Image (cartoon, rainbow, N blue to C red):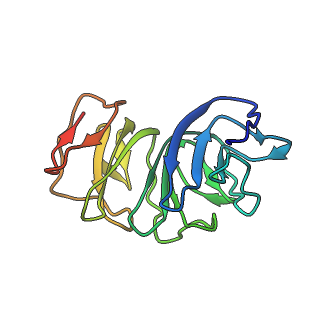
Amino acid sequence: GFAAIAIDAGVQAIAVQNDGRILIAGNFTQVGATARNHLARLMPDGSLDTSYAPSVDGVIYEIALRANGQLMIGGDFSSVNGFPRSNVAVVNEIAQLVASFSQPANGIVDGIAIQADGRAILSGLFTQFGGEPRNGLVRVGNNGSVDPGYIPNPDMCSCVLALQPDGKLVI
């Protein structure tokens, strides 16, 4: 069976890893009787994975798994594991911050879609990403570098993103 576990606040996003472990993110600070700051991983049976303990200082609205097993997170936060990160970050499978992805968003990131080539499209309430003007929608490379040729420039885009099998983006 699946273990019932108490969470002290809302879960905003869920992703299931290939091995069946379940990543949860949101506004919580406790899972069961264990402190977990906005990001946790559950075992396939629903129990807390005690080996996975990242610390994010604000709410996470969206998570997405990259093909290499890393997790991209977006939300309203300013640090991950004590390192400065503005609203978007990448952590590896053992919850360590991926240092090479360090571009900041100047507002909330609440949508993430990972393309087949590894690039990510991010949406949210930002007007700049990595110092470049981007009005709520940006495409970034594996290291967070802004794709200079992708400038759809919507009014703002706090929206749900989904990729179709042909690679087209649905907003």
Q: Measuring from the top left, give residue 154's x and y in whole percent.
A: 22, 32
Q: Please give left or right for residue 135 compared with residue 34 in the image.
A: left
- Whether residue 130 is visible here, answered yes or no, is yes
Q: Is residue 171 above or below residue 163?
A: above
Most foreground residue, 69 or 113: 69
Q: Is residue 104 above or below residue 29?
A: below
Looking at the rendered image, the quarter that the N terminus falls into is top right
Q: Can you tell which quarter of the image residue 106 is in?
A: top left
Q: Measuring from the top left, give residue 170's x and y in whole percent.
A: 21, 36
Q: Measuring from the top left, give residue 169's x and y in whole percent.
A: 20, 42
Numbered label tally: 0
Residue displayed at 38% across by 62% down: 144
Residue displayed at 67% across by 49% down: 45
Q: Measuring from the top left, give residue 26's x and y in whole percent.
A: 60, 37
- Whether residue 87 is visible here, answered yes or no, is no
Please, which residue is most extreme toward the front here? Answer: 1
Residue displayed at 60% across by 57% down: 84
Most foreground residue, 11 or 121: 11
Q: Can you tell which quarter of the image residue 5 is in?
A: top right
Looking at the rendered image, the quarter that the C terminus falls into is top left
Most foreground residue, 28 or 42: 42
Q: Is residue 165 above or below residue 97?
A: above
Residue displayed at 62% across by 52% down: 44
